[in-house]
Amino acid sequence: MRRPLRNVLFGLVALALMGAVLASPSLATPATATDAPPVGIHKIQHIIFITQENRSFDNYFGTYPGADGIPMVNGVPTVCVPDPLTKSCVKPFLSNRDTSIGGPHGSTDAYADIDHGKMDGFVNQALVSLGCTHTTSVCGGEAPMDSMAYYNGADIPTYWAYAKYFVLSDHFFESVASWSLPSHLWQVSGWSAQCAKAADPKTCTNDIALGNSFTANTPANHNYAWTDITWLLYKNNVSWKYYVVPGKQPDCDNDSQLSCGPTLQSSSTPGIWNPLPDFADVQADHQLGNVQPINNYYQDALSGNLPQVSWIVPSREVSEHPGDPITDGMAYTASLINAVMKSPDWSSTAIFLTWDDWGGFYDHLAPPTIDKDGFGLRVPMLMISPYARIGYVDHTVLSDDSLLRFVEDDFMNSQRLNPTTDGRPDPRPYVRENYSQVGSVNSEFNFSYAQPRNGVIEPEWPKTKLIP
C-alpha cells in the first residue's frame, strides 16, 4: 500500500542518483596548495537541519539503552499519568500502530502537560481537546490514551540505527513551550513574535502562542520584521537554502485543532513550515530564491553543491505527524540522509535531525525553565556526521538555540543574533545563544579521526513491527 506514495515522493531520488553517477567529483571546490586544512568545528562546511513533526523523546527513544528514558523496573513503567475521567492512572505503553493520534500541543497544553514539573497533564489535555466530560466510545477509548504510547527499535529501526552509529541527544528541548509555528520561527531566528508593521522590527512583541496564525483574518501574524539567521549568513557570504516538500501542510493553521482539512504548501507559499518568505530581511536582501523545492536538495546533495546551511521541512504525507504513517516519514528521512552520504559533500557535513514539538505525547522529564518562553518539552535529536562520536548518548541540555550557536561559531566567528550587534535592532528579550544554561553540541563530535567516517546507508523501507 505504500508503493504508490513512495513512487510519488521519491521518484526524484532515482533521477538524482543517476545524475550523481554522471556528475564528476570535481564539482566540489578543490583545496589549493595555499589553503590551510580546516581544524575542529571548521571541518564542518555543510550543516543540514532536518525537521520532522510532533514526537516527544519518550515516544521514540524512551527505551533506548543508555538514554534518560521512561522509568522502568524489569521492563514495566513505574510512572503513570492520571485519567480524571475514569479516576485511574495510565502508564506508558508500547504501541505498534503506524499512525497515531497524539494530543493537543499548543502553548496552554505545554504548560498543562508539564504542570509545574509533575509531567502529568497529558491524558487530561487529550480529554479536554475531545470535549470529554463523561465516558463514551471516544472518550473511554484509545484516543485519550494514545498520548502515553511509545515505540522501540523494532518499530522505528532506522532512527535507532542512526542513534547506534552516530549521536543521540536525550536532553534536547524545544526552545519554546508551544506548537509548530513558534518552534519553526525559533529555529531560524531565535525568537517568536508578532509585529504590527511588516518592515518595522520595533513593532514586534514577544508571542509564543500565535494562535490561528495563518488564518485569513489575522494577516498581521505574517509580519516577521525581526532578524533571522539568514541575515547574518548573507552579511558573512555564507550560502543557505530552505528546502520545502510540496504537498499538504503537516498540521492545522489553528494550534487548538487535532484535525483539519488539507492546506497546500510549496516553496513559493509562505506558511507555518515555510516562514522565511515572510521575514522582512529575506525580502530586503533579495534571497527569496533560496527557498526551494525538495527536488533541488537531492540534486544539490548528489552533485556536491549543497549550500553551507540547509533546512528541510516535510509535507504532511512524510512528516510523521499524528494521523500520517511513521514508516513513510522514516523512508523520506532515510532518503534525505542517504543522498548526503552518497555525496561529495558528506566528508564535511553535520546533519541535525529533530522533531519540532512534542505533539502531545508523554515525556517524563521536566524541562528546565530558563525564561518566560522556554524551554518546551523534550524532543528527539540525532546528530549524523563523519565526525560524530560512535553510539554516543549526549546528556547535555540542548535546544535549537544550541544549533543556532553552532552555525554562528562555525561560519560567522561566533557573531550572535543579537539586536545590539547585528545591524537590525529589534526588541527581542533574549539572546539565548549566550545563555550559560544552553549547552553546546561540540562534545558530540570527534575531530581527531584520522579520516572522516563513512556513511551508513539505511534502507528506506526496513523491516518493522509497525502495523498500518
Image: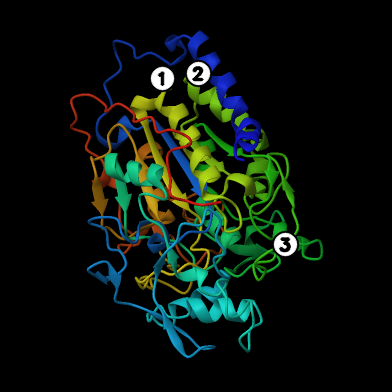
Q: CA distance from mark 2 to mark 3?
A: 39 Å
SS for dot 2: helix
- Name the residue tied to disc 3: 260
117 versus 402 height, above or below: below
Q: Is residue 274 visible?
A: no
Between the C-alphas of marks 2 and 1, the distance is 7 Å
> Is residue 308 among the parts visible in the rendering?
yes
- Which amino acid does the dot numbered 1 rest on? Pro
- For label 1, the residue is 344
Name the residue rendered at 49%, 11% in the picture: 21
**Does 38 sit above or below residue 117?**
above
Residue 355, position in %: x, y? Answer: 48, 53
Which residue in the protein does label 2 denote?
303
Within 10 Å of disc 2 (Cα), the crowding (few <14, some 14-19, many 20+) is many
Tell me the element at label 1. Answer: loop
- Position above or below: 85 against 390: below
Name the spot of residue 102 as percent of width and height, x first.
54, 66
